[in-house]
Image (tube, helix red, strand yellow):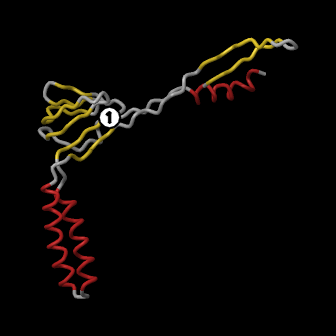
Amino acid sequence: MIRKFAPVIAFFILGVSPAHAQSDFSALHIDLGDRIYVVQVSGVEVGGPVTGLTPSRLSIGQYEFKPEPGLRIERSGDPLWNGFFIGAGVGVLGGLVSCSEPECAVAGAVVYGLFGALVDWAHVGRTKIYQIREAPAVAKRSVRIAPVLTSDRRTVRVTLSF
């Protein structure tokens, strides 16, 4: 009888046990010397040039970080190429709408592409380049046993939470 229910019991035990996804820094596209900012879950922020990088460790000066849920890594500014291409796309569309000549589309792409690159060059904020998502909260498993005594009944209530 137990052999029949063993797979079912194992399924429920394994299904409710907490699972932690393992993340690392291998997908991080930075080089040694790049200036980045690391924001920990506690809110502590460290910025500076990268002095060491492996899949399991990131160093900024004397500070060392390991992959942990909630860790966020940011870079100053914004790359110029995406602003150029966004502006060029708007310029091509605007040039084709205003006149059907290809020269209008090319001129619009150049002018608006340079404008988009200028906007990105002036961008002073930060761009998030990596974030390890926080692990979902795991419900605590518990067993509660409580007697239920009434004038006409005496029972025990068992509550399983998982």
Q: Quadrant of residue 134?
A: top left
Above or below residue 83? Residue 77 is: above
Q: Is residue 120 left or right of residue 157?
A: left
> Which of 83/18 is in front?
83
Q: Quadrant of residue 114?
A: bottom left
Say what amino acid the circle numbered 1 marks: Asp
Most distant residue in the right direction: 152
Q: Give the residue displayed 13% in from the left and 55% down from the top.
A: 122
Above or below residue 60? Residue 1 is: above
Q: Give the residue displayed 31% in from the left and 33% down from the top.
A: 71
Q: Give the residue displayed 17% in from the left and 31% down from the top.
A: 52
Q: Is residue 25 left or right of residue 119?
A: right
Above or below residue 111? Residue 156 is: above
- The residue carrying mark 1 is 24
Q: Quadrant of residue 2?
A: top right
In what element is the residue under mark 1? loop
Residue 70 x/y as whole percent: 35, 33
